[in-house]
Image (spheres, rainbow, N blue to C red):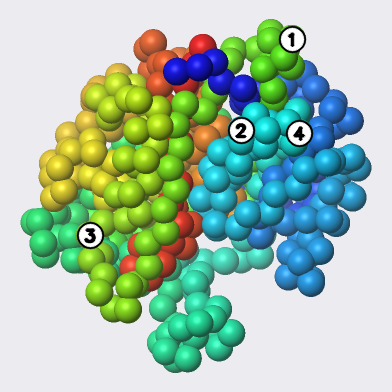
Amino acid sequence: MSRPQAYIAGIFEHPIREAHDRSLAQLHAEVAMGALRDAGLDKNDVDGFFCAGDVPGWEAQGTGPFSIVDHLGLNVRHLDTTESWGSSYMVHVEHAAQAIAAGKCNVALITLAGRPRAEAMATGTTSLNDGHTAAAGQFEFPFAPTVVNLYGMCAMRHMAEFGTTSEQLAWIRVAASTHAQHNPHALLRNVVTVEDVLASPMISEPLHRLDCCVISDGGGAIIMVNDAIAKSLGKPLVSLKGAGYAIKHQNGGDIDLTYCGAAWSGPKAFAAAGVTPADIKYVSLYDSFTITVLTALEDLGFCKKGEGGRFVSDGNLISGVGKLPFNTDGGGLCNNHPSNRGGMTKVIEAVRQLRGEAHPAVQVANCDLALVNGTGGAFATRHGNSTLILERH
């Protein structure tokens, strides 16, 4: 592999989890400044900006990205507004690396921010339906499925096909909570047991409340720079070794609910990186629900299809206990899910692991390769899936 031309030089996750006293634009500004401080750079160094539909004013004739660039006081020569919901920020990492390699920018800023908790959103109630304006709106709008309904169907189908159990899904939440206890900013820091998960209220059968991610405010940001700047910063170097992207949809009704877009994006990323699942030391996996994690692990090749339940059981995802540590910050299940878009924080924790900056209780020894997988949309209808493989140098 040739030497990378772009590196992740700065990361920042906002510590706030309920932002009643902050505007959306203010949150974007605060995460941007945090990532720049981490990189040792100034906002005047930024010449590329990457954002998605969480920026304020996105719906106003599409001028939101221009407004947030104005608000941040940036002088950019490259702008990327690719929207792929929760996986957008992982796509932005790939696009930023490409833009830097092509000379379109030297310092790329990627931001995410949101206030769903301050706006009193309830767990799993978000509708992915765009109403009558969407292509399938006339068929889906009358039924208005919520996110948790859609993932509940996927979990039920996986159970019917492969014998997966609620107890096995619960182990994913147990692992996340075991890690979250060490994160002072995590929204939920109490360690739970399998029994606790099964005793929590049923939200959409077979998913219990503790199978569902948190609703939180906050955000995060990433700074990517070219090779020359990276060398001058004296920071641990983290690069994008491989990436893949795929969209899964309903295919006119011919849809299998037991797999996700990672079945296509994962192989692309591994092929580009020239590595296999056995080489990965740590994984950051989108965990909107426990079934999201289990399905992705299978589709990424960490275990065979249908064997995910056994793979996640008995602490196999717990750092220092199992063979594949995941989401060592507590993930979306326990730590943070800003703006209901979890891809950004997955990249941030992967970079912490590669830098050796995760909490000592969860830091993976000799972590030189990490995989990040994110989904935007919903498994049961349509979604974009991004897989990144990051490397420490």
The mark nearer the N terminus, 3 or 1, is 1
Q: Which residue is mark 1?
A: 232
Q: Secondary structure at mark 3?
A: loop
- Residue drawn 77% across and 24% down? 37
Task: Give the label, 3 or 4, closer to the camera.
Answer: 4
The answer to whether 338 is drawn above or below residue 277 in the figure is below
The mark nearer the N terminus, 1 or 4, is 4
The answer to whether 83 is drawn above or below residue 150 in the figure is above
**Is residue 297 left or right of 160 when viewed as pictured?**
right
**Is residue 300 left or right of 376 when viewed as pictured?**
left
Q: CB of mark 1 within 8 Å of CB of mark 2?
A: no
Name the residue type under label 3: Thr
Name the residue type under label 2: Ala
C-alpha span from label 3 to label 4: 40 Å
Q: Which residue is mark 4?
A: 105
The mark nearer the N terminus, 3 or 2, is 2
- Residue drawn 16% across and 48% down? 305
Name the residue type under label 4: Cys
Task: Give the label, 3 or 1, closer to the camera.
Answer: 1
The mark nearer the N terminus, 3 or 4, is 4
- The x, y position of residue 236, in whole percent, is 59, 12
C-alpha span from label 3 to label 2: 32 Å
- The x, y position of residue 181, in whole percent, is 44, 31
C-alpha span from label 4 to label 2: 10 Å
- Residue drawn 61% across and 36% down? 98
C-alpha span from label 1 to label 4: 17 Å
The mark nearer the N terminus, 1 or 2, is 2
Q: Which residue is mark 3?
A: 258
C-alpha span from label 3 to label 1: 47 Å
Q: Secondary structure at mark 2?
A: helix
